[in-house]
Amino acid sequence: MTALQPKPDPRPHRSAFYQVNELAHQISGDVVLVPDASNLIGIRREDLVKISHWANNGDEGEHLLTPDNIDRLAVLTDGFFRFIDEGNDASVVTLWRGGTPIVQQIDGEPCEAAVDLVTDAISGLRPLQEKWHGLPPLEAEIEILAHRKGFVAGHRPKWLERMARANLAERDVDPAATGEPKGEPLAANDNEPQVDKRLLPYGAAYGGEIRGTTLFGAIVDGKPGQILFSADVAWFYTATGARRISLPEKPKSLAATPFSLGDPSAIPERDWLFGRHFIRKYATASVGPGGGGKTAHSISEALAMVTGRPLLDPDGPLTKPLRVWWINAEDPQDEIARRFHGAAKHFGVTNEQVGGRLFTDSGRDQQFVIARQEGRDLKIVEPFIEDMVAEIRRRDIDVVIIDPFVSTHEAQENDNGAMQRVTAAWVRVADEGNCGVELVHHVAKNQGEVTADSARGGGAFKDKVRSMRVFNVMTQAEGEKAGVDDPRAYFRVDFGKVNMVASGHSLWRRFVSVPLMNGRGLAKTGDEIGVVEPWKWPSADTIAERAASARAAVVADVPAETLAGVKVRLEASDYKADQRAKHWAGNLLIETGIADGREQAKAMLAAWIDAGELEIVRMKDASRHESDFIKPVAGV
């Protein structure tokens, strides 16, 4: 009977990648593809293509890893300053070749020690350890900084120690702690491997391979490194330094929590920060068309928050001043300064009133990207979240305003899952930073009335934020009703989605132009800045009076004898009030040349009705059907 043959691996390139990736952790390198596996002579570092996944297309969007080019898999190791005192510019390639690697230097000054170091690490003769392992944390940090600054041996200025202490404090590392062991073998009998068993749970949590006293290839917070013990403290070492590390907490098992009604006064009140929109530990959003006032409005709000003055609510009370971090991911810092100076000038805000509670930054100077696209995968940038939360805590920030949201991620906006992850990441910043995060977002193109569903991208964005405001520019019809000359200078703010408070009436705003007076020569006014200020919709009585005045103006220049003639004609014949009728009263005005067209005729009839000269009378027409007719008022 013929023995069953094992099925061939349908994806051998996947298995090969994982093996080479393990080798890369072992020798502190990156997985790459070489141009030609049969000839390494003459290749340089720029000829290599880094890959981070077996299905990854590489840095240039080509050189896809396939079963046919497995032999091109290799590992690039450089930065040998971490291990030895030479080979700073050396690059060493380890060609995998199915498990029998070739080690060869391809760049830099010839350095046999670098090649030997990688070879020994592969063969297990000597672990690949940074040269500052074994030093106390403070001394190790000073040496790392000295190398980066290019100081020669023995030259260590005092400020270097201060910088090292600050770095360790940020990583919560005790500068006086003892260093980790230098790799001496543990006591063991001949039948047991000489490994530090304390590393076993760390290997289970972070991956990697234990060799002697070191866990190689551990991945912590997305960064590769090594874990060792000093006394009873575990340390995680990377190319940039070391920090203490502990095992992640095991998640609690799922359990249902009983609920019972008690005293509602014992429930903590929601921590509203400003305007029943900003709330601590939640993400909120403002959505509107480009140029619709979102950015300028957020600047006026930021000044109101940091000063505690009701700049956008003249009848409102003073509030507790807040600390605000206003971030524009697109505009340069000088444009941010112009906008805030313009708003401060308009509202009479002084630097003393700001009180050091306002922080502004530009995405051109610092990266504020919370999610990046790597091939087909969307990766949340965990180091950015850590840095963001740390700075929020350090500055005691109450509100972070991000403008625009789209510039903080590389996700596909029509991908609901991706948008949910990105928005959830900002919710994490709000929660861990104990602050409110406001995301200023655009709407899709060709939108009419902006609603919560108009936000660009998937609906997951709307569903993830706690409160969403929508911005709509005043329409031409609204402008005519309100009696304003330039409707585009006015906009309204509505709560498009409110989870925590009942929605109210629209809040109206308008743009005013503020000269900075930063010009030179004859043009002293300089830049003109659009500043958002509060505006109230006129009352119903005011609108009615304005409309009546406008109608009266339409007939103000009509001679009395002309009006008398119109009355005679209307009395003698039956002219209807309905514009659709063949015998509409407005046609009389057009035929006699009193009105230039239907709109003017309509306005003139309305004005004379308002003035009590004409009236609408209900009567039967020639067909014995009741209709509305326009007749002169009796006795007038």
Image (spheres, grey):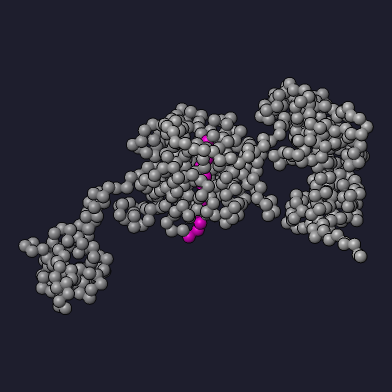
Q: Residue furthest bottom?
A: 623
Which residue: 89% across, 52% down? Answer: 97
Q: Quadrant of residue 363?
A: top right
Q: Residue furthest front?
A: 1
The picture places residue 616, in percent across and down from the top left corner, at 16, 65
Region rendered in magenta: 435-446
The picture places residue 608, in percent across and down from the top left corner, at 17, 61
Is residue 437 a member of the stretch shown in magenta?
yes
The picture places residue 624, in percent across and down from the top left corner, at 15, 76
Can you say which quadrant of the picture contains the C terminus?
Answer: bottom left
- For the question of whether residue 212 can be seen, the reply is yes
Q: Is residue 289 above or below residue 593?
A: above
Q: Is residue 599 left or right of residue 459?
A: left
Which sits in the foreground, 530 or 267? 267
Q: Is residue 503 left or right of residue 43?
A: left
Is residue 322 a member of the stretch shown in magenta?
no
Q: Quadrant of residue 265?
A: top left
Which sits in the foreground, 521 or 251? 251
Which residue: 19% across, 60% down? Answer: 607
The picture places residue 86, in percent across and down from the top left corner, at 87, 35
Can you say which quadrant of the picture contains the N terminus?
Answer: bottom right
Which residue: 89% across, 29% down? Answer: 188
Q: Is residue 132 above or below residue 568?
A: above
- How many dots with numbers? 0
Q: Is residue 585 left or right of residue 316?
A: left
- For the question of whether residue 510 can be seen, the reply is no
Which sits in the foreground, 58 or 2? 2
Which residue: 91% across, 49% down? Answer: 100
